[in-house]
């Protein structure tokens, strides 16, 4: 197994309400799950291959709860990545060189039934985890926006966090409001739903804890 490590920031937006039952070992509140994910890799490597500064993204859909499988996924990799970097990122994103079920990539990969061919494209991605603001754009394919939740009473920003000490994706996530639209190769759309902003620090064995 080639050892890898990624440190970066993510924005994820699914169709659940702001709490997202999946974060609490529950079932999706609409009976199915669809989501868009983006990550900027601030520091990272796979063996001798440097992955720092690259962006990745994914679009997911499951007809029921994630753990029941039958999922569909489209993976996007930064077009700036060279051949070695593309291979490394796709290996990580599909659960390769990883302890079984140790990361969100490995867990999701185990539930995917239909995997579209990966696309290597420009990925515009800006994210401020603490500010709960983010924007992902892959021209002609995917758009995602994240912002703070607003109080229905006075419009003030509402800040909430989820802390998962034994999680496989993050330790602490800021919760916001998101909206996404995917055009190709998968079609989905949702808005005013769960937005997840998190600092990720993962390696071949799972979350890298302080």
Image: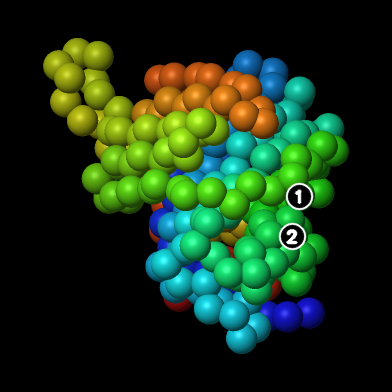
Q: Position of residue 107 (x, y in %)?
A: 73, 51
Left or right: 179 with respect to 65?
Answer: left
Query: Which residue is found at the position 52% from the left and 72% from the top?
Result: 51
Left or right: 127 with respect to 115?
Answer: left
Q: Position of residue 102 (x, y in %)?
A: 70, 62
Vertical comparison of 38 with 185: above or below: below
For the N terminus, the image quarter is bottom right
The answer to which image quadrant residue 199 occupies is: bottom left
- The answer to whether mark 1 and mark 2 are in CB contact below 8 A is yes
Residue holding disc 2: 95
Vertical comparison of 77 with 14: above or below: below
Left or right: 210 with respect to 46?
Answer: left
Question: In this rendering, does residue 69 appear at all?
Answer: no
Query: Which comes sooner in the sequence, label 1 or label 2?
Result: 2
For the C terminus, the image quarter is bottom left
Question: In this rendering, does residue 77 appear at all?
Answer: yes
Q: SS class of the residue under badge 1?
A: helix
Structure colour scheme: rainbow
Residue holding disc 1: 109
Q: Position of residue 114 (x, y in %)?
A: 82, 37
Q: SS class of the residue under badge 2?
A: loop
Vertical comparison of 36 with 78: above or below: above
């Amino acid at each position: 197994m080639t050892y890898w490590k990624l440190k970066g920031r993510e924005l994820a937006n699914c169709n659940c309400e702001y709490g997202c039952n999946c974060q609490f070992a529950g079932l999706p509140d609409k009976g199915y799950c669809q989501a868009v994910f983006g990550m900027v890799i601030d520091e990272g490597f796979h063996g001798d291959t440097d992955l720092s500064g690259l962006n990745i993204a994914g679009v997911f859909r499951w007809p029921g709860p994630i753990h029941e499988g039958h999922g569909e996924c489209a993976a996007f990799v930064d077009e700036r990545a060279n051949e070695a970097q593309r291979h490394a990122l796709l290996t990580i994103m599909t659960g390769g060189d990883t302890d079984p079920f140790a990361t969100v990539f490995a867990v999701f990969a185990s539930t995917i039934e239909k995997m579209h061919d990966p696309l290597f494209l420009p990925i515009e991605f800006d994210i401020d985890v603490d500010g709960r603001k983010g924007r992902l754009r892959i021209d002609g394919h995917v758009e995602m926006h994240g912002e703070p939740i607003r109080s229905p009473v006075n419009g003030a920003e509402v800040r909430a966090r989820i802390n998962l000490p034994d999680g496989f994706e993050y330790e602490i996530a800021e919760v916001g409001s998101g909206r996404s639209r995917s055009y190709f190769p998968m079609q989905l759309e949702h808005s005013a739903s769960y937005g997840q902003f998190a600092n990720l620090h993962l390696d071949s064995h799972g979350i890298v804890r302080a």
